Image (cartoon, rainbow, N blue to C red):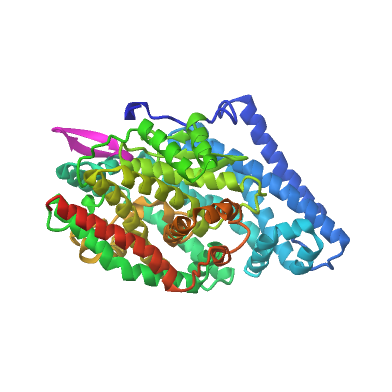
Amino acid sequence: MTTAALPHWDMSVVFPSLESPEFARGFQEVVNSITALGDLFDAHVIGQQPPQPLDDAQVATFEEVIARYNAVLDQVMTLGSYINAFVTTNSRDTVAQARLSELQQHTTKLYQLGTRFTAWIGSLDVEALIARSPVAADHAFALRQSKIRAAHLMSPAEEALAAELNVTGGTAWARLHGNVTSQLVVPIEVDGTTKELPMSVIRAMASDPDRETRRRAYEAELAAWKRVGVPLAAAMNSIKGEVNTLARHRGWESPLDLALFDASIDRATLDAMMTAAHESFPDFRRYLKAKARMLGVPALAWYDLFAPVNASSRPWQFEDARQFIIEQFGTYSQRMSDFAARAFREQWIDAEPRDGKRDGAYCMPLRNDESRVFANFKPSFDGTSTLAHELGHGYHNMNLANRTMLQRSTPMTLAETASIFCETIIQQAALTRADAAEQLEILEAALQGSCQVVVDITSRFLFEQRVFEGRQQRELSVDELNALMLQAQRETYGDGLDEQLLHPYMWAMKPHYYSTGRSFYNFPYMFGLLFGLGLYARYQQDAEQFKASYDDLLSSTGLADAATLAARFGIDTRTPDFWRSSLDVVRGQVAQFEALSQQAGV
């Protein structure tokens, strides 16, 4: 299979099309279910009455309400994933955009019901409820989290208004960012002719072996971001302003404190991880300098970060990736291999880069144990590794399938657990089969990814922290956002990159900044990488013992905080030592990369 025949995912198993009678009925069923849930909440005065004694009637009400609430969340997940499958692969699909907007009107009502549910749980004696109800005991972590969150709610009327305004506020700004960035066409000279190419294609040129091509793509990209900088800065300012305002009114000390709560970690864990990360920067700079030597340049420019270090002796087309992933997942377990084979066979993957399709990669749960994997596949080991990573998310979703929706609510810190593990399986297997030249390519792909997740993620974290702080005073201009981005990149990459050739518009490109519901969509990735590497090390120490509990860990990521789950494997997340040990794996890869590059005569 060549890149010209990359697959699109099959969504027809849910509905034939967005304009089919089946979709219309399914959409109406979701609307009716949300309305019926609201009627149930009203009948029991959920979240709208003073605390009541916990008697048998209250316990029965709880069990009825939570069952219905979980069922509606499940319906909405499937419908939302179905619609988003069309929006993200073709932002010009006006029917999909209209249905998404329509769904958001109804999910706002569901969000408001969720706020009422949280307030209601906050009014109950949760520990007594857990002791009296097996259903509550099964949802103990979610209920205890709701109890804490309830203490940070505004009045019911204010919460309802905030949810309604978010549709035309933060959500609308986020949609604007997605539409502008996915539809942005970039003029660039190719073979003496100026062409207009989608931004996703321009960004893919960052991995072109020709440095002049990479430079021209980089300059064209920056020019294109500059053209749309004003509306994207408006989106950034509006979203960060909204988050600041709501965090303050809900009694959070800062948006970071809310993000830590949502991530199920505490400041001690974040500080320990960041301490280890900062200690590792000199090692990553060694890697960047070794790569510069291989490319024959005095220092890497930003547009060299994703440059291939040598011509691969293996093509890694999509079919190669499929076979390798299925085979290597089988070295862990037949269950994991069968899962991957099913994903490819049943067309769960949309791999082709194309006009109107958003950049990047993700995996979303669809229904039951099914997921869908979004990718912009490149015929390289990196493209194969990305597929393995996203399929890891799908494997995680499969292990969560027997849980209710509230039990499946996995924090971002733990959401990367299976994806990093699966990616590491592929990397280690590829290394053992490769000759020296291909080992360099594989190590470079691994280090490139780790550098992004440790060094670049830290720069994004620092940037977002400073934007939130600045936004408390006033709106920030395009130039100010650029300056903050460059400052963060200089602090983290240091002399590993040419500081005159950085990327001031990374804030415009990254969709992670454009969400009112997920601030600091950065440090959880670092947690995920280092936690995943640490778990892989445990797997290597005692494979059978690890396998006996790993799938159960994945099915439990919504049932406890990160520190509690990590303790199952003897991991203490609140001290730097664990994070240092995971980064020691990366340090070993840097040393191996340096040695191989020297053997290659660089």
Q: Taken as a whole, is the magenta stretch helix, strand or loop?
A: strand
Q: Is residue 444 left or right of residue 106?
A: left
Is residue 228 at all visible to an observer of this figure?
yes
* Residue 103 among those drawn in magenta: no
Q: Is residue 404 left or right of residue 562?
A: right
Which quadrant, please, contains the N terminus? top left
Q: Quadrant of residue 411?
A: bottom right
Rendering coords of residue 349 (x, y %): 46, 35
Which residues, given as a range, are shown in magenta? 186-201
Is residue 501 at all visible to an observer of this figure?
no
When the figure is inspected, residue 233 is found, relative to residue 249, above or below; the finding is: above
Q: Quadrant of residue 132?
A: bottom right
Rendering coords of residue 201 (x, y %): 30, 38
Q: Quadrant of residue 323?
A: top left
Rendering coords of residue 148 (x, y %): 64, 68
Rendering coords of residue 172 (x, y %): 49, 49
Residue at position x 30%, y 57% from top? Answer: 589
